[in-house]
Amino acid sequence: MTAATANTAPNRRIMLVMLVITLAPVLISSLLYFFWKPQGGHSYGELLQTKPVPAFAMTAADGKPAALGDFKGKWLLLAVDDAACAQACLDALHALRQIRVAQGADMERIRRVWLVADGVAPAPAATTAADGADICLVHGAIPLPGDLRSGIYLIDPLGNQVMRYGREQDHGKVIKEINRILKNNEALG
């Protein structure tokens, strides 16, 4: 046996190990791709088609003209209801405040907006319940999808509709999801 043939067996093993190490990730990823498909991320709220919210007629509570564009650069949490503001409306305004405050350091990136759908100034008790939310009186239709009075909407800083949450949904889960959205979009508002 010569020195060349004595060295061949370990060299072949080394080459075989290198080949397996090189091909293993490709084979494993191919098997996973074809036989195990992950479900992907699921949103807790209703993911809306990302498109700008069309302009609509509204005024600020003090009577000055207003538009959603006035809030660009901030994430918006919107609630829509009438000026009478029944208990469901009061609960939604409270939820908006809690969702914003729960964001901690990121809460400054969010503004709360109550759209008064009937265009009438709300009662003082409802204004007090809004607790610092921007109140806008709407004059006409609001171009947002779904049942307006049963949802909370999230609008991005560019004015695009993003998410819709039902008012009855678990606010803890809504808080976590909005927190994730803000963390993943730090460069945006």
Image (cartoon, rainbow, N blue to C red):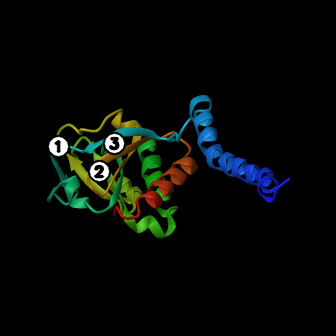
Determine which residue is flagged by label 2: 122
Residue furthest to the bottom in view is: 105
Q: Is residue 20 left or right of residue 94?
A: right
**Which mark is first along the chain, 2 or 3?**
3
- Residue at position x 28%, y 48% from top? 160
- Residue at position x 17%, y 39% from top? 140
Q: Where is residue 149 in the image (x, y as percent from the top left)?
A: 36, 38
Picture quadrant of residue 38: top right
Q: What residue type is labelled 3?
A: Asp
Determine which residue is flagged by label 1: 139
Q: Which mark is drawn over residue 81?
A: 3
Q: Position of residue 122 (x, y in %)?
A: 29, 51
* Mark 1 burial class by Cα count in 10 Å: few <14, some 14-19, many 20+: some
Residue furthest to the right in view is: 1
Of the two numbered discs 3 and 2 in the rendering, the one whose residue sits closer to the viewer: 3
What's the distance in space between the residues labelled 2 and 1, CA to CA?
14 Å
Q: Is residue 180 left or right of residue 85?
A: right
Q: Which amino acid does label 2 sit on?
A: Pro
